[in-house]
């Protein structure tokens, strides 16, 4: 079957004002890889706000990857404006669709929605579509016969994700997944990789769709990196997993398998899941930077965020990372409901106390992302502008996470305090860490 998978321009989910590319659409690339292995003819197409009207005629199946709520409107416009054969199978999936499946199915006038981990689901859907548009019995789907929506039982997670083929990067232009000057400030030819799926932690600001974590083996990670070296000449890589450092045994296995490759790399972590022996193992395997989700220096806010970490844990993690010879970057979220002058001052004091163990800072403004616990309970957090509220303006693009200065919560007086304190924190960060990014 001829299949096309559509995904939104990646920098629209991040810094679209700067057109700064982020990591490639791994969900789409894994789906494309399993479909190619099954014998389907697969294409991957990018959707941009400037060219939403694509000619998709000739494809027997069209899949829309709703990778973020911020790009939902762009893809919905593409569904309405693009030329799609009347008898083509229309599918939806992705992060936003997982949070709001029935809405997504209806909005895209789709035949079927694949929920959750969809590599096996989509193969069954394509096989069934040859003879029928009724998908009853295929776990992990919602489908419609034009009159009502049918929901099948959820599909169990794949037991061993090593069984999946490598993501189909060859279906993208190389400039969309090979980057330079993006690895801890080094000018290295690099690519992004995923070595695990899911995050078991309950942070209320995070739109994580899967709470069980699955790891690939060290052998599988080694195979992908050798492929990237031999085919594309990479010198390094960044692990984009939601939270790579959770299971120390799994992380150590990957490190031991890739040490001989001589690559530089970075990963994301919490501050309460590392220790010095593990950090030294990572350093020996080429890790040059860990990006920690610090979020705030206020323990009251950390508790409200359900981050459940402390200033003492943050300081210990940064000191241990420096002792292991690895640079440590802090991600800070400013403006969570309850932020004020005092909580911002606590964040500034924490950053100052980290001293030379802190190499870089990325400062984000809080956005109530659809699918998060905060978004699901707007009254408790005094939020404005959720699509479930009377003041909804229909603008999904406002949920992007960079350069976002919308008044999301609280009274005008509370928001002005948040605005003023953000400017002080921003100026502080820019003065002390000029390699911010």
Image (cartoon, helix red, strand yellow):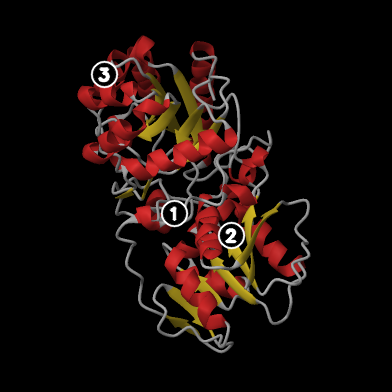
Q: In this orientation, which residue lies closer to the viewer: 16 or 309?
A: 16
| Residue drawn at (67%, 75%) of the image | 60
Query: Which residue does the numbered mark 1 point to in the structure image?
Result: 375
Q: In this orientation, which residue lies closer to the viewer: 384 or 291?
A: 291
For the C terminus, the quadrant is top right
Q: Element type at marker 3?
A: helix
Mark 1, other Cα within 10 Å: few <14 / some 14–19 / many ≥20: many
Mark number displayed over residue 320 = 3
Q: How many marks?
A: 3
Question: Can you give x and y, in whole percent of width and height, for residue 244 in the image?
Answer: 35, 39
Q: Element type at marker 1?
A: helix
Question: Can you give x and y, in whole percent of width and height, for residue 257 in the image?
Answer: 32, 34
**Which of labels 1 and 2 is toward the front?**
1
For the N terminus, the quadrant is bottom right
Q: Earlier in the sequence, mark 1 or mark 2?
A: 1
Question: Can you give x and y, in whole percent of width and height, for residue 277 in the image?
Answer: 21, 24
Question: Does residue 393 appear in this view?
Answer: no
**Which of labels 1 and 3 is toward the front?**
3
Marks 1 and 3 sit apart, C-alpha to C-alpha, by 35 Å
Q: Is residue 372 above or below residue 278?
A: below
Q: Are marks 1 and 3 in contact (CB under 8 Å)?
A: no
Question: Does residue 205 appear in this view?
Answer: yes
| Residue drawn at (56%, 81%) of the image | 129
**Which of labels 3 and 2 is toward the front?**
3
Mark number displayed over residue 308 = none
């Amino acid at each position: 079957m001829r299949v096309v998978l559509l995904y939104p321009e990646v920098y629209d989910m991040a810094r679209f004002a700067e057109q700064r590319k982020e990591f490639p659409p791994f969900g789409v690339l894994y789906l494309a890889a399993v479909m190619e292995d099954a014998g389907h003819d697969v294409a991957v197409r990018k959707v941009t706000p400037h060219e939403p009207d694509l000619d998709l005629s000739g494809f027997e199946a069209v899949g829309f990857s709703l990778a973020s709520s911020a790009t939902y409107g762009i893809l919905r416009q593409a569904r309405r404006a693009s030329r799609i054969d009347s008898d083509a199978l229309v599918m939806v999936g992705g992060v936003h669709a997982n949070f709001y499946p029935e809405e997504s199915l209806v909005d895209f006038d789709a035949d079927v929605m694949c929920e959750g981990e969809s590599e096996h689901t989509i193969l069954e859907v394509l096989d069934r579509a040859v003879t029928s548009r009724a998908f009853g019995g295929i776990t992990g789907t919602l489908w419609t016969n034009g009159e009502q929506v049918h929901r099948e039982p959820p599909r169990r997670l794949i037991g061993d994700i090593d069984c999946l083929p490598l993501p189909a990067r060859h279906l993208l232009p190389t400039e969309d997944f090979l980057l330079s000057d993006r690895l801890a400030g080094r000018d290295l030819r690099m690519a992004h990789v995923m070595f695990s799926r899911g995050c078991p932690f309950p942070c209320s600001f995070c739109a994580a769709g899967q709470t069980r974590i699955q790891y690939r083996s060290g052998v599988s990670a080694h195979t992908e990196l050798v492929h990237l070296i031999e085919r594309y000449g990479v010198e390094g890589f960044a692990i984009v997993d939601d939270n790579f450092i959770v299971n120390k045994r799994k992380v150590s296995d990957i490190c031991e398998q890739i040490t001989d490759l001589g690559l530089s790399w970075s990963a994301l972590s919490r501050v309460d899941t590392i220790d010095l022996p593990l950090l030294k193992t990572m350093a020996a395997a080429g890790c040059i930077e860990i990006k920690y989700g610090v979020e705030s220096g206020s323990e009251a806010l950390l508790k409200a965020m359900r981050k459940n970490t402390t200033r003492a844990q943050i300081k210990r993690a940064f000191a241990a990372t420096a002792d292991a010879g690895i640079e440590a970057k802090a991600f800070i979220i400013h403006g969570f409901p309850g932020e004020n002058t005092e909580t911002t001052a606590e964040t500034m004091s924490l950053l100052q106390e980290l001293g030379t163990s802190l190499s870089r800072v990325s400062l984000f403004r809080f956005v109530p992302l659809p699918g998060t616990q905060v978004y699901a309970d707007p009254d408790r957090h005094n939020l404005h502008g959720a699509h479930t509220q009377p003041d909804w303006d229909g603008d999904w693009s406002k949920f992007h996470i960079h350069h976002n200065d919308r008044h999301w919560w609280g009274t005008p007086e509370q928001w002005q305090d948040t605005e003023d304190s953000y400017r002080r924190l921003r100026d502080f960060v820019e003065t002390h860490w000029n390699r911010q990014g």
